[in-house]
Amino acid sequence: TETVRNDFIRQIVREDVANGKHAAIKTRFPPEPNGYLHIGHAKAICLDFGIAREFAGRCNLRLDDTNPAKEDPEYVVAIQDDVRWLGFEWNELRHASDYFEVFYLAAEKLIRQGDAFVCDLSAEDVRAYRGTLTEPGRNSPFRDRTVDENLDLFRRMRAGEFDDGARTLRARIDMASGNINLRDPALYRIKKVEHQNTGNAWPIYPMYDYAHSLSDACEGITHSLCTLEFEDHRPLYDWCVDRVDLAHSPELLKPLTDKGLPLEASKPRQIEFSRLNFNYLVMSKRKLLAMVNDGLVSGWDDPRMPTLQGIRRRGYTPSALRLMVDRVGISKQNSLLDISILEGALRDDLDAAAPRRMAVIDPLKLVLTNVPEGTEETLTFSNHPKDDAFGERSVPFSRELWIEREDFEEVPPKGFKRLTVGGDVRLRGAGIIRCDEVVKDADGAILELRCTLDPESRPGMEGANRKVKGTIHWVSAPHAVAAEIRLYDRLFVVADPDNDEGGKTYQDYLNPDSRRTVTGYVEPAAASANAEQSFQFERLGYFVADRKDHRSDAPVFNRSVTLRDTWAG
Ligand code: ATP
Ligand code: MG
Ligand code: MG
């Protein structure tokens, strides 16, 4: 079943295709390699790569590495891993730094056109001259330098003659513009910092808007999709694209053609959409980094983190994320979505995709006194109640079982449908049992239940149709494998932990029970799982074999999500 997506961006693209505006559609996903990708990025990835796929176009992965101080190659590797995990592949892997030479030539062109000037104002003075929302700015005293003077100074900036911050190259646009981004914004700054790709070749680095618009243009991007906070930057984006006009300036692209890259410069169109935000999550990279550094989580891939690495480890599937993105849709309306949308997509995805298994996470021993010692039976269970394609498996059954401690009550509350002393319950797929005796230790703690199995109630027998109130799950004690089970819950107890009101920070809202580790027992067919395999543990929830720590002889399962939305926050 192919989802039909028809948001406003796809409508624009569809029209452009119908009108023959572009030979082919080309998009890009441009993360800054200064942190790990998070759930929000999944929306941008699905949109950028998805549109390219749907319209038989191309999509580049471009690492927006214009800010050398903050970047780390570790992130570059993780970003690629995450995009592929989500099910997408880029046509070309590019770095904004691939285009530094083009940006430089373009800046000289702007200077020659009278569209850029070298400014000696300090950062503080630039701010003072900029004006406010209600007041126009003032022209820099350096605004009317001659072209020759500007070219000379800019070349000397590039040669490394001046100190950090001593000068900037600024666009010469309009200090009275109602849009502050157009008030002679900086295009280049001096920053003598080593860059991960270009080393010490450049003492000057381009500013974001300039580099981003020109990167799009020289890659031949047709539709440059970004989040709403860039809406106010679009006039500057267009100004850079138009004034530099890479599409008609092959001489500026010579550094690329020299490297054997095709000439495919374009006039890209920027289109903005709303960011994805969920309650109960913190998604800014800065805060996620702080959470890792403060030891609030075990790392970037802690299963409670909203990073793609984290939720992957938690057991989120790429298809669940793509389903979530489709359900949320694309619009220009910013909103804080309920986390149940994310969890619901995972439940629906795993309900269809995850085989069923039995596991007991709070074990209580149950002995079937009328089953002879040494009995070993093999029962056949279907792997999925709604889909025969999942096939069947063997489940061992014997005299000693583990059941869930909460499935037995000595003094049952009203309406309790599970096991009680003298009461009946159905053991899933095995028959009906009655509890005859509770064995306790000296302190009164329950050690085991002694029960009898109704021999006429085995699966397939007439007596199996006898009505009993409840059905419980179990595993065979001699066959089950002890497993570490990590019960994850929301990291924060309030819906809006990102709201720093009243001097509180997200650190004040941590859920002390967001991670609980217990030792349970799983049936052999769960223990033998591969890492990252997901199951529904019947009646308990969806669990995944931990990507890093799971071994068949020492299983580790993470709870991905409960069966129902039971959170009482
Ligand atoms: P953060 O503020 O978390 O650091 P960012 O926007 O700086 O995010 P980038 O690495 O620059 O992160 O993002 C790459 C792309 O992903 C951009 O096009 C950006 O608009 C998009 N993106 C980032 N966060 C979200 C989000 N929450 N929802 C949708 N798209 C997002
Ligand atoms: Mg960014
Ligand atoms: Mg950022």
Image (cartoon, helix red, strand yellow):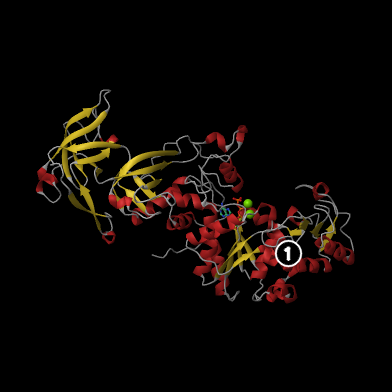
Relative vertical location of residue 332 with respect to residue 60 in this rendering, above or below: above
Q: Position of residue 327 (x, y in %)?
A: 46, 55
Q: Report whether 354 appears left or right of 85.
A: left
Classify the position of the C terminus by image quarter.
top left
Above or below, 544 relative to 265: above
Q: Residue at x 13, y 43 (%)?
A: 466
Residue on which disc 1 sits: 240
- Residue 211 located left or right of residue 381: right
10 displayed left or right of 486: right
Task: Report x, y in % for residue 388.
Answer: 26, 60
x and y percentages locating residue 424 in the rendered image: 17, 37
Q: Secondary structure at mark 1?
A: helix
Between 81 and 196, the one nearer to me in the picture: 196
> Is the residue marked 1 within 8 Å of ligand 1, measured from its CB?
no
User: In the current view of this chain or complex, which residue is farthest to the top?
Assistant: 443
Q: Can you give x and y, in whole percent of width and height, for residue 263 in the image?
A: 66, 76
Visible residue check, residue 235: no
Q: Amino acid at mark 1?
A: Cys
In the depicted view, which residue is nearer to us: 288 or 467? Answer: 288
312 vs 283, nearest the viewer: 312
Quadrant in which the N terminus appears = bottom left
**Residue found at x 28% / y 35%:** 405
The residue located at (65%, 54%) in the rendering is: 71
- Name the side, left or right, on which 204 lies relative to 218: right
